[in-house]
Image (cartoon, rainbow, N blue to C red):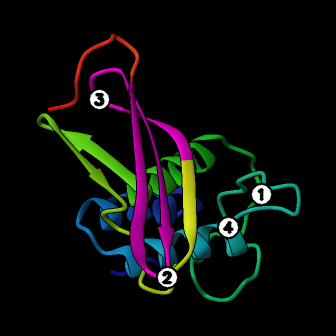
């Protein structure tokens, strides 16, 4: 059926799924659609397609929070993933994002991770173990 009846949060959750599947370009596209078509100027998620560009047949404006939270989670999934005892740095970053950095994103196991990418290559990674352990 396609996205005819998707709410805005469907796009932010799609961004998460694309990031977990290591599709950085797809994740960025879904999150951009969410931000541009399903959020008001103050960044509130409004469920319906505010641009009336055909991204959804819904055009209503009730404010909800889950779309914004999923958007933030999608960005984190693009920058850092941790599961099954592994931490992946920038696993779903689009190739066009050549120079980016993040500071102290939380990873599984009480680790805070910071990283920097310069000219398309990860150039710096810092891991702080809050529990005093060592990353494996």
Q: Which residue is mark 2?
A: 119
Which of labels 2 and 3 is toward the front? Answer: 2
Q: Which residue is mark 1?
A: 61
In which quadrant will I find the C terminus? top left
Give the Cα separation between the discs numbered 2 and 4: 26 Å
The first of marks 4 and 1 along the sequence is: 4
Residue plotted at (65% across, 58% down): 47
Name the image quarter holding residue 21.
bottom left
Residue furthest out toward the right? 41
Name the image quarter holding residue 64.
top right
Does 117 appear above or below 132?
below
- Name the spot of residue 87 as percent of width and height, x first: 24, 44
In which quadrant will I find the N terminus? bottom left
Judging from the image, what secondary structure is the residue with disc 2 in? loop
Q: Which residue is mark 3?
A: 108
Give the Cα separation between the discs numbered 2 and 3: 28 Å
Does residue 57 appear to the left or right of 86 in the view shown? Answer: right
Q: Which residue is mark 4?
A: 35
Mark 1 Cα within 10 Å, few/some/many (few <14, many 20+)?
some
């Amino acid at each position: 059926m396609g996205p005819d009846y998707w709410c805005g949060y469907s796009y932010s959750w799609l961004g998460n799924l694309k990031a977990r599947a290591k599709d950085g370009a797809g994740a960025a596209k879904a999150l951009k659609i969410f931000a541009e078509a399903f959020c008001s100027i103050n960044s509130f998620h409004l469920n319906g397609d505010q641009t009336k560009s055909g991204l959804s047949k819904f055009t209503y404006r009730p404010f909800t929070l889950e779309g914004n939270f999923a958007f933030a989670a999608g960005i984190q999934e693009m920058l850092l993933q941790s599961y099954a005892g592994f931490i992946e740095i920038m696993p779903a970053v689009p190739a066009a994002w050549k120079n980016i950095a993040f500071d102290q994103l939380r990873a599984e196991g009480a680790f805070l991770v910071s990283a920097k990418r310069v000219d398309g290559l990860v150039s710096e990674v810092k891991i702080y173990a809050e529990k005093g352990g060592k990353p494996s």
